[in-house]
Image (tube, rainbow, N blue to C red):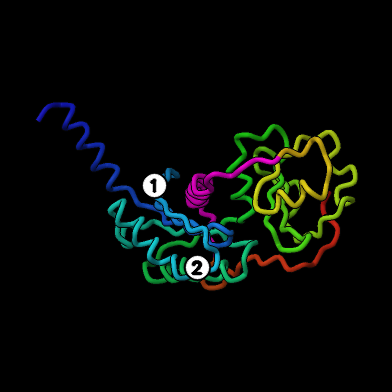
Amino acid sequence: MGNGSLKSLTILKSLNSLKSLLLIDTALETASVAIAREGMVLAQRQNSRQNDHAAWLHTAIQEVMQEVGVSFSELQAVGVTDGPGSYTGLRVGLSAAKGICYAKNIPLITVSSLQVLAGAVAEKAEDLIMALIDARRDEVYIGVFDRKLNIVLPEQSLVITPETFPGSFANRKVLLCGSGAGKVMRLIKNNDFVLVEIKNINKYLAYSTYEKIKDNKLSNLPYHEPLYLKNNYTTPKGI
């Protein structure tokens, strides 16, 4: 065996010895599961039928784990979006994540659904990112972040009207993303608002989960609850 082959074999063994992360998102219209190592996504599955997330989830988890060739005992942690989003979807995803963490005695890492959306487009941002999830009628779940994902507008439930942001983002370039972005673009005419498509959230979910593990920012496994964001606000707070 040549030196090149030996080097390749050594690298392969090193990669196989690394612990893997299981990533779960069932909070949004399109659900996803993925396997990642050190913040890099190795395999993923998606499901666009929102009413089918619960039935789809466990089969998808088995498929991505088989594709990468890892077992539950080789998982380092489970990263899951914990809201806001679909009430049923949040319960499905967090319950599955907790069950695996309990069974294998591994950490639970939770990440905001809105921050994951913003993180997925952060590389395109010049100034601000407005992450939006459709909450039916003229309501959205909203969070505004700067390009480094620091919070500018705290996450909240908000009814959108043409007067929702009177001068709040004057002369600020704002990227809008997520399922509620089209609703905001339709109701609010602002030339500084730019709609951007999200293609894949797993890259940022993997990165954020890995960073939280390194910083020991673990969620409370027994007591952590989804962030449902009930409809408490009619005007934005924190601007």
Q: Residue furthest top?
A: 3
Marks 2/1 in contact by CB < 8 Å: the verdict is no
For the residue carrying disc 2, how many other residues have a C-alpha within 10 Å: few (<14), some (14-19), or many (20+)? Answer: few
Nearest to the observer: residue 188 or residue 78: 188
Question: Label 1 sits on what residue type?
Answer: Arg
Tag 2 secondary structure: helix
The percent position of residue 137, horizontal first and vertical second, equals 76, 63
User: Looking at the image, which residue is at 41% across and 51% down?
Assistant: 44
Task: Give how far across and how far down residue 93 sits, in percent.
Answer: 51, 66
Does the magenta segment cover residue 197? Answer: yes
Which of discs 2 and 1 lies nearer the camera? The answer is 2
Residue at 67% from the left image edge and 56% from the top image edge? 133
Q: Circle 1: is it few (<14), some (14-19), or many (20+) Cα within 10 Å?
A: some
Q: In the figure, is residue 76 to the left or right of 146?
A: left
**Residue 138: x, y in percent?**
78, 60
Say above or below: 178 vs 29. Answer: above
Q: How many marks?
A: 2
Within the magenta stretch, is there residue 141? no
C-alpha distance separating marks 2 and 1: 28 Å
Left or right placement of residue 186 versus residue 102 in this view:
right
Q: Earlier in the sequence, mark 2 or mark 1?
A: 1
Which numbered marker is on residue 126?
none
Q: Which residue is mark 1?
A: 37
**Looking at the picture, does residue 233 appear above or below residue 147?**
below
Q: Where are the magenta residues, as a range?
A: 195-219
**What residue occupies the far left of the structure in this picture?**
1
**Label number found at residue 52:** 2
The amino acid pointed to by label 2 is Asp
Residue 77 image point, x, y percent: 43, 58
Q: Residue at x 30, y 60 (%)?
A: 71
Callout 1: helix, strand or loop?
Answer: strand
